[in-house]
Amino acid sequence: MKEGSGFDSKMDKALFADAIATPIGALFGTSSTTTYVESAAGIGAGGKTGLTSVVVAVCFLLSLPLAGFVSGIPSAATAPALLIVGVMMLSSLN
C-alpha cells in the first residue's frame, strides 16, 4: 500500500476495513467481525442507505427485553432452524 496509489475500488476499501477489523476484534475478545459480508447482505436485501442500519439498531434495542426469554430456549430447539438456514444459504451456490 505504500507504493500504491490507494484503493482501486469501493470493494478494496470494504475488504481492507474487514481485514483490519478482524484482528482488532480478536484482540478485544469479540466474535469475528465481518463488515463487508453483512453490508453486502443488507444491500442485496434492498437496503442501500444508512437508514437500514438505524432501523436494525432500533429493532435490536426493542428486542433486548426478550433476551431472558430467548436464553431459556434449549439449543436442541434452535438447531433445526439453523440447519434450515444453512441449507437455504447453500442453495444459492448452484
Image (tube, rainbow, N blue to C red):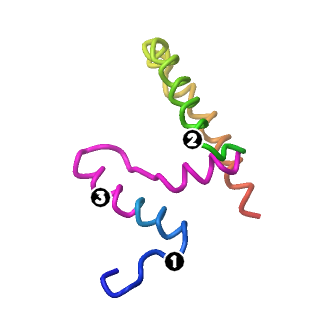
Q: Is residue 41 magenta?
A: yes
Reading the chain from its start, which is encountered first: label 2 or label 1?
1
Instruction: Describe the element under mark 1 as helix, strand or loop.
Output: loop
Front-most of 51 and 29? 51
Q: Amino acid at mark 3?
A: Pro
* Whether label 2 touches label 1, CB < 8 Å: no
Residue at position x 40%, y 50% in the image:
33
Q: Residue furthest left?
A: 27
Residue at position x 49%, y 70% in the image:
12
Residue highlighted by disc 1? 8
Q: Which residues are magenta?
A: 19-45
Front-most of 78 and 56? 56
**Image location of residue 2, percent across then percent down:** 30, 82
**Image location of residue 39, percent across then percent down:** 56, 50
Q: Amino acid at mark 1?
A: Asp
Disc number for residue 50: 2
Q: Is residue 33 magenta?
A: yes
Count of all numbered marks drawn on residues in the image: 3
In this image, 46 relative to 12: left or right?
right
Q: Residue furthest bottom?
A: 3
Residue at position x 71%, y 45% in the image:
45
Residue 61 lies, with reference to residue 87, above or below; the image says above
